[in-house]
Image (cartoon, rainbow, N blue to C red):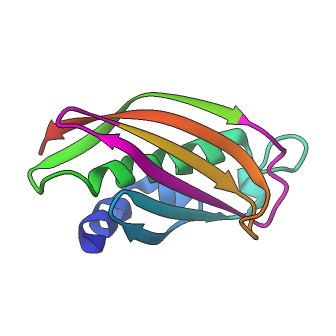
Amino acid sequence: MYDRIKESFDKQGLMKTLNAKLVSVEKGEVKISSEFSEALTQQHGFFHAGVATSIVDNACGYAALTMMPEDMEVLSVEFKINFIKPAKTDKLIAIGKVLQSGRTLTICEGYVYDSSEEKLISKMTATMIAVKK
């Protein structure tokens, strides 16, 4: 399962741009981190919301993919994100979790934490659709 997710993750240029790393893969749950860089900030010096959104969307998508047969992939069809605190940390940690996996749609929740995984920065609810490879 890890190899399948890692191979797909490594093909994503955006994840390289965001200094993102695949931290862990379990059935129904994926964790991704992003190291701080000045290139990833907004005007106040925090991580840009787009960074947090991108990595947690990816974590949710890959969590959904862990539930899919080998001949299937997933795409995001909808998400909502709430920003709870400014992303003032040296690393973002995104965790995607599957709430319900179906043949066509998978519903996920995602969380973005600071580097200690104690401060919740944002929360996502996402819907992924299964598509043939």
The quarter of the picture where the N terminus appears is: bottom left
Q: Residue at x 58, y 38 (%)?
A: 124
Q: Residue at x 76, y 70 (%)?
A: 116
Instruction: Using the rendered view, name the quadrant where residue 94 is placed.
Output: bottom right
As for residue 89 lying within the magenta part, the answer is yes
Q: Is residue 116 visible?
A: yes
The x, y position of residue 53, in whole percent, is 59, 41
- In the displayed structure image, the side of residue 93 where residue 77 appears, left or right: left
- In the displayed structure image, the side of residue 78 where residue 114 appears, left or right: right
The x, y position of residue 109, in whole percent, is 51, 43
The quarter of the picture where the C terminus appears is: top left
Closer to the camera, 40 or 34? 34
**Where 69 falls versus 117 (above or below)?**
above
Residue furthest to the front in view is 100
The x, y position of residue 103, in whole percent, is 17, 37
Closer to the camera, 84 or 100? 100
For the magenta stretch, what is the residue range? 83-106
As for residue 108 lying within the magenta part, the answer is no
Tally the marks: 0
The x, y position of residue 6, in whole percent, is 33, 68
Instruction: Using the rendered view, name the quadrant where residue 81 is placed.
Output: top right
- In the displayed structure image, the side of residue 85 where residue 69 appears, left or right: left
Q: Residue at x 78, y 49 (%)?
A: 41
Residue furthest to the right in view is 44
- In the displayed structure image, the side of residue 20 where residue 112 appears, left or right: right
Q: Residue at x 78, y 39 (%)?
A: 84
Q: Is residue 14 visible?
A: no
**Where 105 falls versus 122 (above or below)?**
above
